[in-house]
Image: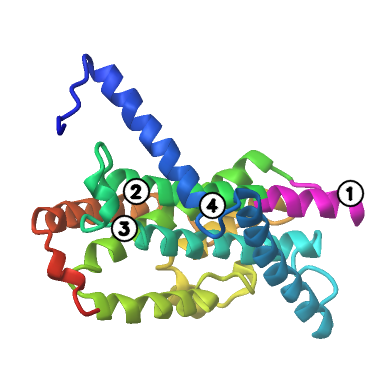
Amino acid sequence: MFKTPVYRSKSRGFLNLLEVTYHTIVKSARSGHRNAVVAMVLNMVQGMIMIFAFVLFFQVLGLRSSPIRGDMLLYIMTGIFVYLVHIRTVSSVMGAAGPTSSMMLHRPMNTIVAILAAAVSTLYLQVVTLVVILSVYHIAVTPVSIHDPIAAFGFLLSAWFTGVAVGMIFLALKPWFPRFVAAVKPLYIRINMIASGKLFVVNTLPATMIAMFDWNPLFHIIDQMRGAVFLHYNPQFTNPDYPIYVALTLIMIGLMGEFFGRQHVSLSWFAGR
């Protein structure tokens, strides 16, 4: 009755793993609701509410035009939406199924598949939300013009990738320091409300303020993305490669931590928590 699956070739085993990953991604993407369409709509509505709340906020403050020469909604999207992609990816990866999850009892499921599914499903939902918002705005309000759309999408992927990296660190620490991680995660989110630079233009900041936020990969990503979206903005104080180096370093540390934790897995980790 119980037997271990034996694959005739490495390619067969790889294809089987891809199939498991695909189904896990679908399960993760529709986790917000039983109906996959409703789950996507709920995600889009949350993003739209936050973006249009900031549009209204800027209108109330009397800032009817973008600080950068260009469309006001695009200025807010390059800040708020990129921040949302990063933060939601951190939360999703951090909440991925761990080695003590009941899902890990089913072969060939493993923690790497769970992490990958959480990350890819979040990216999928955010990209769909982005396309819907820009399409509605383009049709109903005014045509959307992006200076370099390929580079802009690349920086969006960079925000997602750094979110995966930070989420991996939290995920690796969570079994050992659950209360510490529970306290640090909201602190990280709140710090990035300011330190990400989504509410101001980096080129207009004094050197002292730039030095305060220069450590943050998201600070570099948002500024570089604005350079790709707006024709008349040229980032002068940020580096497009810095977030990638930071993300790769954090992912390697997170993978080593996750592997070490998996070797010492215990069902008592979360007992009584």
Which is in the foreground here, disc 3 or disc 2?
A: 2
Q: Callout 2, which amino acid?
A: Ala
- Seen at 53% across and 49% down, the residue is 123
| Circle 3 residue | 168
Near-viewer residue (72 or 25): 25
Return the disc, 1 or 2, that comes first in the chain's sequence: 2
| Circle 1 residue | 139
**Residue 155 drawn above or below residue 18:** below
Q: Residue furthest left?
A: 264
Near-viewer residue (255 or 211): 255
Give the CA separation, mark 3 to mark 4. Answer: 22 Å
**Residue 33 drawn above or below residue 108:** below
Q: Helix or strand or loop: what does disc 2 sit on?
A: helix
Tell me residue 102's x, y (percent).
26, 54
Q: Callout 4, which amino acid?
A: Arg
Give the CA separation, mark 4 to mark 2. Answer: 14 Å
Is any atom of residue 158 visible in this view? no
Q: Callout 3, which amino acid?
A: Met
In the picture, measured across the screen, residue 106 lies left or right of residue 76, that is: left
| Circle 4 residue | 30
Which is in the foreground here, disc 1 or disc 2?
A: 2
- The residue stretch that appears in magenta: 129-146
Q: Is residue 144 magenta?
A: yes
Return the disc, 4 or 2, that comes first in the chain's sequence: 4
Which secondary structure type mostly characterizes the magenta part of the structure?
helix
Category of crowding for the residue at label 3, using alpha-carbon neighbours closer than 10 angstroms: few (below 14), some (14–19), many (at least 20): many
Dots 3 and 4: beta carbons under 8 Å? Answer: no
Q: Helix or strand or loop: what does disc 3 sit on?
A: helix
